[in-house]
Amino acid sequence: MLRLIAYPILIVAIALAGWWAPARWTLLLWIPLLLVAINDSTQRHHSLRRNFPLIARIRWLFEELRPFLYSYIVEGPLDGRPFARTERDIVYARAKGELDSHPFGTELDVYSDEYEWMSHSMAPAPHADRAQRVKVGTEQCSQPYDAALLNISAMSFGSLGANAIEALNRGAKLGGFYHDTGEGGFSPYHRIHGGDIVWELGSGYFGCRDDAGRFDPDRFRDRAADDQIRMIEIKLSQGAKPGHGGVLPGAKVSAEIAATRGVPKGHDCVSPATHSAFATPIELVEWAAKLRELSGGKPVGIKLCVGQPHEVYAVMKAMIETGIRLDYIVVDGAEGGTGAAPIEFSNSLGMPLREGLIFVRNALVGCGLKDEVKLAASGKVHSGAGLAMNCALGADWSNAARAFMFTLGCVQSLKCHTDKCPTGVATQDPGRQRGLVVEDKAERVRRFQAATVSALWDISCAMGLDSPWQIRPHHLHERLNSARSDSIDRIYKFYDRGVLLDDPDSVSGARYWAMARANSFRAAL
């Protein structure tokens, strides 16, 4: 950045110097620029620099500044992606404990598809037990966990810096909600403040792998015995890059990251695209049962972005055939998250959260498993209204990643994958991390979560309901066009309990149910 800024500053300085400096000093100032211009005109790698020596370098300055200029000067309140200015503003306000009200009515076009609404009641519920939580754990689980309605979604140490991980976990401890480690493992920075941990196991088995990168049950048992770890989450896929592995280049594998992940320092750290611990749906649920046993009876679940529908049904059939139950399922939306991904994957693969959540809800309800297996939603949630809509679609609780990054000071500069995050959130650079003060940001994490969950309860009461878990699909309305709208259960199909077992041919997903096999993820032909 400084290198890019230096050239235009030098040009201006020399131009000014020409008005007053003696000729010999002006000549000395021009010599470095002349050398740069000669180098530009003779090099063979950049056409613009070759054709427009020196001046072409200004282009890179504005490319570097573009995200900031666009965000602060060009964008309107409803513009900006992935998160609009108004979406970020409500997170910032709640995190800081500032007024989060909005004057003069909605800025949304209520007759366009950007507007959707929950049905309020003429008789709001006056009281509600706002301390209620979600009990996660089937009868096969001896250490169930009471989860909050909003928790910190998976973000790895390595993707985020040490100060960011510390602040998130301290905030989780203060607020009484959980912090998902991401697949990067349970780091020392997750431990410092003692916040509840969900340990995510990806295909790299970081923190419980042998030297060949395979799952090591003994190492898992030792680590999972930690009282701070409350649940185990098997990551099958994520919204940003479903079905795609990952590589952390060796240059970024520091001693701390190497120790956390159980990999050699300075060597490429590979997350394969697929797991080696199982190969079929039955093997998946059997491995989940093994993890539950090794952890001393803690809840074990899976996280996935829905892709091939028959594969979800195959997992349901595996649970039915074996009698083994997953304790929970987290549905990640194709909206993506904090992880950088190939543009083709983030733009063109995976089912969006709404469709994915409805599909998994239907699979559980249709198999009569929804009362046992809890369902969570993870994907771009940032407000109480978003939490309420997830509840309407079947979610028992929600997780958020990017919203919590905003509480840490993230300005959506989209530098997460470059190690040059300007706010010190998604970087391992000690100099940049210095700007993130753990104690201050942790309190912001706590305030945002508390205010957002409180907003969910306010919405539930306004709807005349005693809790968010009473919100149903018919409470959520969506526009079909400027002249028509309907409740979500009239737009999407919501299955009745046991229908996939009793009358599968009657539902829209009948062909996928017929394709699903408990002994293979491949479709039956």
Image: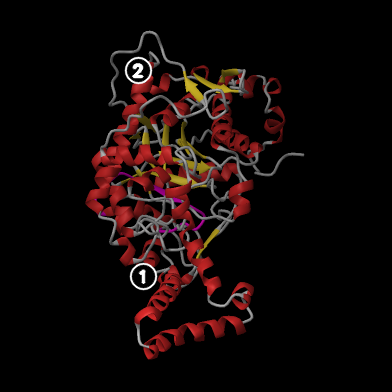
User: Which mark, residue 255?
Assistant: 1
Magenta residues, start to end? 192-207
Give the structural element (helix, strand or loop) at label 2.
helix
Q: Residue at x 37, y 35 (%)?
A: 150
- Residue found 36% across the figure and 39% down from its top: 91
The numbered mark at residue 356 is none
Q: Position of residue 107 (x, y in %)?
A: 46, 29
Instruction: Please identify the quadrant where the C terminus is shown.
Output: top right
Q: Amino acid at mark 2?
A: Cys
Circle 1 Cα neighbour tier, 10 Å, few/some/many (<14 / 14–19 / ≥20): few
Of 253 and 340, nearer the camera is 340
The kind of secondary structure the magenta stretch mainly shows is: loop
Residue 159 is situated, as x and y percent measured from the top left of the image, at: 42, 58
Secondary structure category for the residue under label 1:
helix
- The correct choice, above or below, for 361 with respect to 475 in the image is below
Name the residue that disc number 2 marks.
461
**Image quadrant where residue 114 sits:** top right
Image vertical order of residue 301 relative to residue 248, above or below: above
- In front: 238, or 436? 436
